[in-house]
Image (cartoon, rainbow, N blue to C red):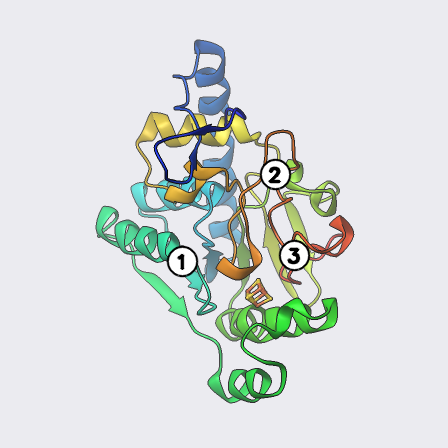
Amino acid sequence: MNSTLSSIGHGQPQAPKRTAPDAALVAAVAEKSALVMARLNTIIDRHPNVVFANSLGAEDMVLVDMICKDNLPIGIFTLDTGRLNEETYTLLEQVQKHYPNCSFQIMAPDFKLLEPWVREHGINGFYNSVENRKACCQIRKLEPLARVLKGKDAWITGLRAAQSVTRQNMDWEEHDALNNLPKFNPLIEWSEKEIWAYIDLNQVPYNALHDRFYPSIGCAPCTRAITPGEDVRAGRWWWENPETKECGLHKAK
Ligand code: SF4
């Protein structure tokens, strides 16, 4: 996305409109899209009971579009931590209407784990230490993930290598040791520009926060807008070091 901040009225900063992709970018996106479709079909052949973790970020919306348009037999789920932005819930509803042929499973945290943790640490206790933050992610994300992956053959993510220092050594095909499953990242080599070109070319719905300088969106209290020149994941857990900035869903090699 263009990195120049501009304020419109008294509202939040708005990113300027993206320009239409040029011919070279359109060709690159077409080539990479064909590769992703080939990868998805390979995954289905090898692992028929496969699911896709849709975190509703821009990358995930590209995969949702490809899976739903081609009616690929890949289950789609979202981890609803209970602390997502209103814009993310709006997108979730929009996506359900936009792709009526697809079903979107929504996973909630286990209240038996969450309620005692909140009682002990407070509703925003994740700000108090990295340990607390990771414990909150464990309850709101990792445990529901383990539950949805139980009995599955493999899972798919929208991760890209360029997203952060913790993702640079990831491959398109990995082994998720935590859940003991093959894990696939079919968009691993895509650039941010290519993701947005795909979204624009295919009129894919996306989170309104992306137009307000939120390139990476997680839970509302743990995500803020970035300023021009900052790393795309600088707005996630901004009070921590870059090396600790994963929720544990995606362990670096
Ligand atoms: S991102 Fe923040 S609110 Fe969300 S699960 Fe992790 S610590 Fe909790």
Q: Secondary structure at mark 3?
A: loop
How far apart are the two marked residues, 1 and 2, measured between alpha carbons? Answer: 25 Å
How far apart are the two marked residues, 3 and 2, measured between alpha carbons? Answer: 17 Å
Residue 253 visible, this angle:
no
Judge left or right: residue 154 versus residue 178.
left
Tag 2 residue = 232
Residue type pointed to by label 3: His
Q: Secondary structure at mark 2?
A: loop
Tag 3 residue = 250
Picture coordinates of residue 242, whole percent (x, y): 74, 49
Q: Nearer the viewer, mark 3 or mark 1?
A: 3
Q: Nearer the viewer, residue 9 or 32?
A: 9
Q: Residues within 10 Å of mark 2 (few under 14, many from 20)?
A: some
- Residue drawn at point x = 65 percent, y = 35 percent: 230
Residue type pointed to by label 2: Val
Residue 62 visible, this angle:
yes
Q: Residues within 10 Å of mark 3 (few under 14, many from 20)?
A: some
Ligand 1 within 8 Å of disc 3? The answer is no
User: Which quadrant of the frame does ligand 1 lie within?
Assistant: bottom right
Q: Residues within 10 Å of mark 1 (few under 14, many from 20)?
A: many
- Residue drawn at point x = 55 percent, y = 38 percent: 187
Looking at the picture, does residue 44 appear above or below residue 35? below
Looking at the picture, does residue 91 appear above or below residue 29? below
Picture coordinates of residue 121, whole percent (x, y): 63, 82
Tag 1 residue = 76
> Quick check: marks 3 and 1 in contact, CB under 8 Å?
no
Q: Nearer the viewer, residue 13 or 78?
A: 13
